[in-house]
Image (cartoon, rainbow, N blue to C red):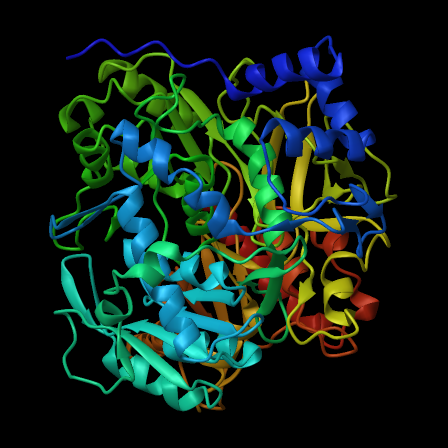
Amino acid sequence: MSVHPAPPVSQISLYQDWLRSERGLVFDDYHALWRWSVTELPAFWQSIWDQQDLQSPTPHSAVLADARMPGARWFPGAQLNYAQRVLRHVAQADAAGVPAIISENELGELQQLSWPELQRQVASFALTLRGLGVQRGDRIAAYLPNIPQTVVAFLACCSIGAIWSVCAPDMGHPAVADRFKQITPRVLIAADGVHYAGRAQDRSAAVQALRTALPSVQQLVLLRTPFAASTIEAELSFDDAVARDDAATRGFTPEWLPFDHPLWIVYSSGTTGLPKPILHSHGGVMLVQAAHGLHHDMGASYSSNNLGERFHWYSSTGWVMWNGQVAGLLGGTTICLYDGSPSGTKESPDWGVLWRFAVRHRITVFGAGAAFYAGCMKAGLQLAGSGDLSGLRALGATGSPLSEEVQRWGSAQLAQAGRPEIWWNNISGGTDFCAAVIGGHRDLSQQPGRLQCRWLGCAVEAWNEAGQPVIDEVGELVITQPLPSMPLGFWGDAQHARYLSSYFDVYPGVWRHGDWLSIGQDGSCVIYGRSDATINRHGLRMGTSEIYAAVEALPEVLDSLVIDLECLGRDSWMALFVVLREGLVLDAALSARIQGAIKSALSPRFVPDAIQQAPEIPRTLSGKKQEVPIKKLFLGQPLDKVVNRDAMANAACLGWYQQQAAQHLAR
């Protein structure tokens, strides 16, 4: 087994050296640096712009022209383009012989894109989109898996100022249609099949259903795969879209766009209504990724400090960590994609899949959902059996809280596999602003089960019920100062009513994120799970309303309520309570039908762990389902502390839920 290399100089150390030499700023410790970054916003974000060498052909008139939240205006006058920042690395990366993308699927098929080939394919696809009539501001919807073609399509889209939006093919077409219908896409890019967990999965019928459900779509660009059961018609094949190699492709350059030009639309489900189509800007995403790259501690793979850096974060395209994985290209880092199941098949579970992938491709920074690491531990996986992991220098975890037990297990396993003293970059943030706000710092001490610090530029606090910041107490995670990657708004929400009600209804002018947070005296943090009723299955969020729509469409089901007990140190455990028509009893056949409805409408990920027949669904006098109080009840809080009986329409049913909660806690 090889000796692991010395770690590079940390990116935050390099940034602090720059602040000292270029700004004359010296800080006693990280907390002082963080405090400066959230109180002197223009100075901090200008320093990130300068130190990270963001380029604009026109000057900006201010860093923060309006500090209102929401409504902050950043860098007016500046022009940027996400694709331009990625492709600036082509010459240096190619000269160093490092690839842009390495990709593998569970069939063992390998794809590798050099930086010049990435540039050529992006140019070809961008010119194809222009040829189809796509203009700035048009929406491009993608139904694609985690493969290089998806990255190419995204970069091509944003290079010409179109707005990107992607959903994963493991999501049922009704849920995808609910998202895409809101944004009226002009072009649909789709794969007709995928391979997952040992099985070919035909998606041709889903693609046809989406085409029918989206009347705004004028062209379908189809990625044909060997996994489709039938052939469907399309205006253009993906292969043809990336085939050009001529003077036009060689001369193509991404368009300069205003700082706040929309980049993509991502979706985050709340507890009511359709999924929220969240709009982020080119400049906001790029600037925050530049700042947070200091914390992720990755550098350009061709640089002397980080030579050979390779970054993998296991994700589907339906999770915001796909966006985070692709963002590695912004800094010139080789990204390594895996398309397939991280745990083998149902018949032959194999939690070593991703670790062997990391060995084969000499990955240096490896990330996954916290549930993945817990799954490895519970399966009794021995990492030393995966091969030489000595080149791995950092592990990332997010999606749900990572417990102390799992982190200690992982560190011990990696020490046995030749990589002692591994750094864990446990992070927490959200799709909502496409960033982490709490996470790692390679030069700070680690405490298993805790996140090391609040990140630079992120004015995160824990507030109690009186709206006061607290230390060493659990409170609501709030952000008290604007962040450049906060949404431009929600697509179609012209008056921002839905945006305001989602994040600013409890504390006007302050972002309420919906997580329980505790901040220690030393600045380290613990996330305890969701403070609202949103379902979080290993990092993938789904609104309860979408589950109700699927379940209550069944004629047998009159009403339903779902809770997710994802919480620190516990696996996500999701319970569905159903009220059935008179005379019906919940049996195995009906349970299977309910599970099938959720699978087909949403995703297998959101099939509940338990389905129970209930006498009634508790509701307020105004008819609102009491999801959060029942969730708190099942987490062990006393009934009189979680619900006001006087505000309920059917308080008598609470006794039944209290009994079920007691039985659950006893187990």
Residue 474 falls left or right of residue 253: right
The quarter of the picture where the N terminus appears is top left
Q: Position of residue 464 (x, y in %)?
A: 81, 40
Q: Nearer the viewer, residue 205 or 607?
A: 205
Q: Is residue 636 placed above or below 380 in the rendered structure?
A: below
Q: Vertically, is 592 above or below 642?
A: below
Is 185 situated left or right of 386 in this image?
Answer: right
Q: Position of residue 347 (x, y in %)?
A: 12, 54
- Is residue 571 visible in the rendered structure shown here? no
**Does the rendering let one see residue 285?**
yes
Residue shown at 41%/41% (left/top)?
Answer: 329
Residue nearer the viewer, 471 or 324: 324
Q: Quadrant of residue 189?
A: bottom left
Residue 336 falls in which quadrant of the image? top left
Q: Residue at x 49, y 60 (%)?
A: 158
* Frontmost residue, 384 versus 59: 59
In the picture provided, is 156 more to the left or to the right than 515? left
Q: Answer above or below: position of 392 versus 532.
A: above
